Each structure stands twice: as C-alpha cells, then as structure tokens.
Image (spheres, helix red, strand yellow):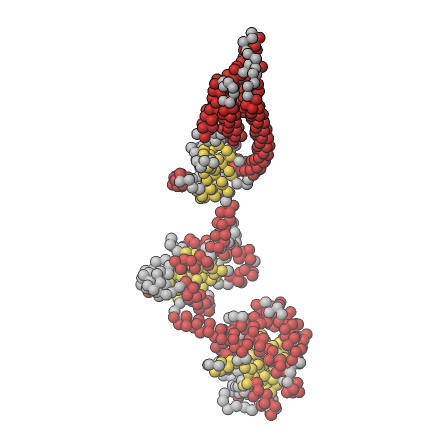
Amino acid sequence: MAEAPAVPLPDHEDATTRHLVRVAGWAVMLLGGVIGVLLMFDDPVQPARVALNLVAGLVGGSALWLARQQRWTQAAHLLVWGVWVSVSLVAARNGGVNGPNLLNYPVIIVLAGWLLGARATLTLVGLTALLFLGFIWADIQGMFKPVQVANRVAGAVYLAGILVLTAAATLLSRRNYMSRVQEAQQTATNLAASEAALRKLLRAVEQSPESIVITDLKEDIEYVNDAFVRRTGYERDEVVGKASADYSSNGLAPAQRDGLRATLARGESWAGEQVNRRKDGAEIAEAVVVAPIRQPDGHISHYVELKQDVTERKRAAQEIHRLAHFDSLTSLPNRFTLMERLSALQGRAGRPPTTQHALLLLDLDRFTTFNDARGSEMGDRLLCAVALRLSEILPPQGLLVRVAGDEFAVVLHGLGADASLAGRRALAFAEKLQTALLRPLHLQDNDTEEAQLGASVGITLYPQSANDVAHDALRRAGTALHRAKQAGGGRVAFFEQGMGEAAEQRFRVERELRQAIGAGELRLYLQSQVDVLGQITGAEVLVRWQHPRDGLVAPGVFIPVAEESDLIVSLGGWVLSHACALLAQPLFQERRLRLSVNLSARQFRQAGFVPQLRAMLAASGADPRLLTLEVTEGLVIDDFDDAVAKMGELAALGVDMSLDDFGTGYSSLAYLKRLPIQEIKIDRSFVRDAPTNADDGVLVEGILSVARHFGLRMVAEGVETRDQADFLSQRAPDIVYQGYLFGRPEPDADWLARAALVGTATVEDEG
C-alpha cells in the first residue's frame, strides 16, 4: 500500500507569516493606542477620532491574544479586516482621498497577501477600489470637509508607524521569500540526491544476483527483479498481482507457511530454506529471508522476500558428504561410516552389552597378482563386481563397507545375547560369503571377462565388554584376518584372546625396537665360515638386540616384527653400515676375509639402495670385493628385471651376490643363468639329513652340480656334525662350511680377537 502524500500547512501557519502576525498585531496595537492617547490632547478633543484609533489598537491587541491561543486563522482575519475597517472609518473622517490615511491600504494589502492568501487579498483589493471610488465621488460632491491637522505629533507618530510597519512587512516578506528560495534550492538538491540514491537502489535491486520479491499484506506480488525472472522462468506480468504462494514460495510446506505468517504477524523477520519449483517444474533450493517493510510512522505496508539460490551449494554439500562417507569406486560406505556404525552399536558406556554384533574383515586372495597381470582398470572392475556380489547376500540390517584397497568389512546386527550362538551365526555368514565369491565374477557386460578369487576373513564379536570401542573391534578383526592369511588364504579366522595378546606383544616389540635402533641397543654378531681344511674364509653378519630389561633378545622375536613393518629397512641399514666399518679393519684387509650380510626384500627394493651402499663403502674405506650380499629366491622372482639391474650395479662395485636358501624356492635354472650371482648357499634343511636320507642326498648333489656348472662358490649352512661335513667335502672339495660344528655366532669383538689369534677354526664339542 502506497503512502498518502503529506498535506502542506496553510500560509498563515508558516513560521514567517506567524512572525508577521505578531509584528503587525503589535504595530497596530501600539500605533492605535499611542495616536488615540495623543489625540486626547487636541483642543478641542475629537472623541470620534480618539475612539477609532483606540478601536484599531484594540483590534491589534485582540489579534495578538488569538495568536497566543494558536488560533492563527482568526487572528489573521481579525487583524486584516479589523484594521481595514478601522482605517476606512478614519479615512472617511479625515477627508477620504485627501487624507493621510490612504497610506495604510498598501500595507494592509501586503499583509493580506501574506496572511490570507490570494482570494482574500483580491477581495480586499476590490473592496478598497470601491471605497476609493466612493471617496472620489464624495470629494467631487463636496461632502468632505477640508483636512485639518490638529495634532502634528499624532500625525508624525502615525506616519512613522506606517513607515515602520511597511518596512517590517517588506523585510519579513523578503526574508520569507529568501528562506523559501533557499528551501526550494535545498529541496531540489535533496530531491536530486534522493532520486540518484533511488536510481542506484533500483539498479542494485534490479541487478542483484539474488531474487527479490515485494508483496502486499495479502501476500500478493507487487514487484519482482530480473534475478527472479531468470531463475524461475516466469515473466513479470505472469506473477505481478498473483499470490506469492503460487509462484514465489510454492515450495513451502503448510507448517512452514504457518510459521512464516506467525513470525511476520509479530513484526519479525523469517529465515529458512525451501525447495521451490520453476515454471518448467524443475526444483530449485533457496535460502529465504522474508522481512516486513515499515513506513515512517512504523506501520507495516509490505513484505520483501530475499532469496539466494543454494542449489549448487547443497549439491556440493551432498557431494562432500558422499565423499566423506562413501567409496568413490564401489559407492559402498567407507571406513568412516563403518566407525560411525560401530560407535552407534557400542551401547551405553559402563553397561554390559545386551546383544552381540559381528564385524567381519574380508581380504581378497591374490588380488595384487590379478591387478598386476590384468591392469588397474580390470582390478577396479573386479572390486566393483565383488561389492555387487557381497551386496546380494547382505542381510537387510547389515552394513557392507569397502575399507581400503581390496579389503571389505561387513557388520552383522543383532546376533543375540549368547556369544557362542552369535559366533556360529557369524561363521555361517562368512562361509556363505566365501562361497558367493567362489562363483565366477563377470567383469564385462558381455560376460566374456570373468574372474574367480577366494577371500580370507577375520571375525570378531562386538561389543565384548561394557568398555569395548569401535577401534578395538577393528583391531581384533584385523588380527584375525592376519591369522587367516598366514594360514594360506581362503580361510576364516575367529579372533581369540591369544591373538590379541600376540598382537600386543608384536606392537610392544615394534615400538621398543624402533627406539632401540637409535639408542645403541643393537649388537653385531659373527658366525664363521670355513673351508674343508678348517681355515676361516669369512663370516656371516648377524644382529642381536641387547634389551635393557629383557636382556639378549633372540632374532626370531624381533626380526619377523621388523619385516612386517618399515623397521626392517632401518635395521638392515644399521647392520650394513656396521658391517662396512668392520670390513675396513686390518684383519679383513690383510687376510682377505669375506663378510656376508643378509638383505631384506624391502631394503633391496629401496630406490636409493645402491647409492646408499656406495656411500657406506666410501665412508668406511672397506673393500667392496670382500662384501657378499645374500638375497632369497623370492626377492629375485618378485621383480626379476629390477633385481637383475641392481645386482649388475653391485657387481660393478665389486660386491658379490649370494642366493640364500637355495632349493627352497623356485630354483629355476632359467632364472639362475640370468642372475649375476657369485655364490649359492645350500639351505640347512637339506644339509641336516643329507648323509642319512637318500632323497636329501640326491638334492644336495644336484645343487652342488648346478653350482659347479655355473662356476659358483658353494656355502653349506647348518653344518653341525662331522658326517655332514664329510658328505659335503666328498662331493665338493671347495665347499665352505657354516654351522655349529665350526663356531656359534659370537659378538664381533670376540670373533675378531679369536680370528686374530688363530688362523684355523677349532671344532667345538657341541653340535
């Protein structure tokens, strides 16, 4: 609803004209009173003239009294018409057109113009003209007596008063005029500024990227901007005059609309989100603020709707939520969702569980091999096929998750309060799961590509106590899965308490070993290698851990833990560095004794392994020709080309390579002839029974024959008896022995001292 225009004040209520009423009232009252008093001193006194002037003074005083009562209209009329009548009577008494009172009429007309407006002034001018005509006719007829000036003081006062009143009226009129000119100029300036501001505001509203809709109090649309037209597809003439509920806010639910109206009824602004519909029916999400528009007097005349398009923002938020909670490849829930679900199933802290759930971790067997052979694209398809197959057998209340890589998790809900029964149900589902995966998985739409992989499964029940948490459950399931994979794959392992204790032990060993490497707790041990004459030809480097609490820790305790983590690289680097320093001692240089060092697969596969070894040799001053690095067949076969390239680089340095545990792995002659190795090490499992077991004897003879054929040094480890030594020496006179028969592993300092004293090894009594 538009605001009604303000009604201007009448002229006589203008500030300047009010001043004029006061000035004229005082002038008339004083002039009439003073002249009336002065006329009383005439001789003879003319009562009529005195009375007329006193009446004129009374008119001025009455006008002032009315002005004091804020009755400006009556005061103005009384002042103008009362003075006109009084002056006219005095003029008629003083000779009409020949008298001095005619000077009053211009002043009265000026006052009438300012105080009464155009119509009253024109009436006054007409009456004055008629009066003058009457005076002129009366003068022609000789009806007026000659003008007699009896009191010159009164005349002077009269003339002075007329001049003062005329000057005051003129100055006040000019002041009023100039004030109005300034006001008009200021008003014009203000209007120009307001118009510019309004144009700027209009452009801002029109060009605003947000939709703006103005409605009346009935919620009918009165205005929409260009953004509304573009966003909704409606033209202005389609919506103006129509209900906002049909076009602008057609996505508001009834409850939302009731809340909006209640808020607006309280004179407050409403804010919320709604999904409105475009003209073509498409949905658009908007953040909306509806606010009342108040007029200067405070009453509400309209409502304005400010609407921001949040469709993309909500879509982005949904995408962020999807990425945070779901796997991008399989669209399954991810690890984060798994932890949320397990936390929700935890139950109340401090209270024993009322029902059991099960967490199953599943890892595909041979997936890495499949991925390497078929490529990552087919590997991704296989993972998607597995996800689909597992989804088909998932119970309605179950949760299937892709944890990472080829590892999946299943949460089974509500398996009952009996842990034994819950465990059997979890095992039954695990078997069902494995059976489902053994069926061929289709990787192409045309069914031409198929794959068949087994899976290892680790199971734990959850929660197992009042304080059981999600991370503990995941750790238990991971431990069980590790046990299943160690058993050869395709197995199901249920978490048992012993597994947890073993995992705790492995974790403790790993943590303390990480500290031990830098704390100087590792010790270098050497085990002699001798020829058939018993002369020391070198030694194998071994490592022991001198634990500050547990004493000397056997390698079987910490080496497997190191191999399962990155510690094996740090541990191997420590051993190799100290071996190079040992090799630089004069004993090795003078007697040309060799040192053999075992390499782990992770250490050997490090990109910078060869440069690191070169730097160690250079820093220590060791002769690389006295160093032998032992690698296993499995290490070589996993990445044959890379292994051959690195062995070639090491051979260029002068370092010899030895194939450890020969005969327990692939033992392919095709591989063997391509490897740049200088030594073969026969595994202790063959040496142990070679003298008494014909099969083992034949195997050892075959290995020795292969070594002679390729011109390789032969080292037999685990030689503990004279029969074993004799068996080997009869078939290979140049073989090197290593075993308890010729010496146990001993600290490097002790070995050096003994080797320096004797040139041949003594046979130990213990075997």
Against 48, residue 483 (above or below) is below
Coordinates of residue 676 in the picture (x, y in percent): 64, 73
Dividing the picture into quadrants, the one containing residue 670 is bottom right
In this rendered view, identify the residue nearer to me: 616 or 602: 616
Q: Residue furthest front?
A: 43
Q: How many marks?
A: 0
Coordinates of residue 744 in the picture (x, y in percent): 53, 86
Coordinates of residue 372 in the picture (x, y in percent): 56, 61
Against 478, residue 173 (above or below) is above
Look at the image and tell me whether residue 129 can be seen.
no
In this rendered view, identify the residue nearer to me: 359 or 527: 359
Coordinates of residue 194 in the picture (x, y in percent): 56, 35
At a point 43% along the width and 34% down the height, the residue shown is 217
Dividing the picture into quadrants, the one containing residue 178 is top right
At a point 50% along the width and 44% down the height, the residue shown is 310
At a point 60% along the width and 78% down the height, the residue shown is 577
Against 5, residue 314 (above or below) is below
At a point 59% along the width and 77% down the height, the residue shown is 576
Look at the image and tell me whether residue 46 can be seen.
yes
Q: Residue furthest right?
A: 652
Q: Residue furthest bottom?
A: 757
